Image (cartoon, rainbow, N blue to C red):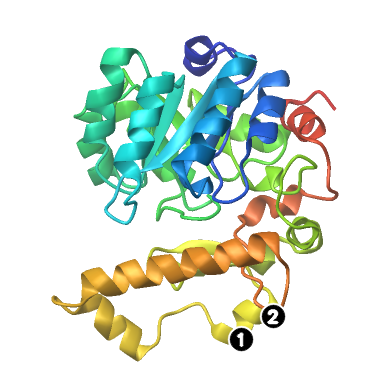
Amino acid sequence: MQTRLTKLLGIQYPVLMAPMFLVSNVAMVKAAAANGIAGCIPALNYRSNQELRKAMTELQAAEICYGINLIVNKSNYKFQDQLNLVLEFKVPFVITSLGNPSKVIEACKPKGIIVFCDVSTIEYAHKAAALKPDGLIAVTNQAGGHLGPLAPQELVPELIRLFPDLLIISAGGVGDYKSLNEKLELGVDGVSIGTVFIASEEADVCIEYKQACVDYSAKDIVCTNKLSGIPCTVINTEYVKKIGTQQNALQKLLSKNKTLKKWFKLWTYKRGMDTLYNSAFDAGYHNVWCAGTTIEYIDAIRPVSEIVKRIVGKK
């Protein structure tokens, strides 16, 4: 399983523990490193710069390979402060999502910080590749959370053909050894895996969220645009069934209005993120839990070490 990714990051297996909003934490990333893979945490998982600094101080002291995920569009008003911390700590790698990664690449590359860019279409991949990151993460239609429109078999081979000098990592659809090998056979340098780690002992989310990942299956995953305005996969709980997954007529109108759409999108994003936060840590009636179809591979709440072993064929 040695690839350009394992060599670049100094890890045993070509696997990234994907940055999961509200789920990823220091304990999970440490456990990932202890078991031969590299984990990444969204900077937005921390409500303040002080909290993010504390987490990065602990990770730096552990002397492991880890990453920080930066949302680079205008919805992230903390972006510059988060980027400054990334530069200060010389984080081993960064994953950019949902926007133009130019500022991140320009700032990180001179400091030797590795940058991977999420891409979901060929058009956007061309734009990101022109900025010369270290690699592209192909966000496919099998990804959990924010997903792309294309199947791995469509997106991945084309990225490999177009950008042979960049590392190509596939995101979505991996939950065991068989599915890992299916993606590696496409020629990727590695895979990014998220959903199966939600039901880990190290995750801080509420037990109800973890148990839902055990109890529900792939057929219970639905796509909604009501959380952030961008298609996002969630478990089809009773509450999700009640509120529906599509914006109503007024919301659709506001999202297209030239004057109001910017503010409506920001309001939608904030409201959706607040809903996810409340659901993740305090199970109640309003249960909106992000997950992908790879919950099909979850049959129990397990430590990260066991989950990794299942994926890399050690158990």
The one of 24 and 53 positioned closer to us in this rendering: 53
From this viewpoint, is residue 179 visible?
yes
The image quadrant of residue 1 is top right
The numbered disc on residue 132 is none
Judge whether 210 appears above or below 310 on screen. Answer: below
Q: Is residue 164 left or right of residue 273?
A: left
Circle 1: element type? helix
User: Looking at the picture, how far across and down is residue 297, in whole percent?
Assistant: 75, 48
User: Looking at the picture, how far across and down is residue 160, in whole percent?
Assistant: 36, 28
Q: Residue at x 31, y 69 (%)?
A: 265
Q: Residue at x 55, y 44 (%)?
A: 172
Q: Residues within 10 Å of mark 1 (few under 14, many from 20)?
A: few
Residue at the front extreme of this rendering: 50
The image quadrant of residue 128 is top left
The one of 22 and 247 positioned closer to us in this rendering: 22
Q: Are marks 2 and 1 in contact (CB under 8 Å)?
A: yes
Mark 2 lies on residue: 238
| Amino acid residing under circle 1 | Lys
Residue at the left extreme of this rendering: 258
Circle 2: element type? helix
Mark 1 lies on residue: 242
User: Looking at the picture, how far across and down is residue 126, in whole percent?
Assistant: 22, 36
Give the mark count: 2
The image quadrant of residue 129 is top left
Q: Residue at x 72, y 32 (%)?
A: 311
- Gap between marks 2 and 1, in whole Å? 6 Å
| Amino acid residing under circle 2 | Glu
From this viewpoint, is residue 158 visible?
no
User: Looking at the picture, how far across and down is residue 27, in whole percent?
Assistant: 70, 33
Judge whether 247 appears above or below 109 on screen. Answer: below
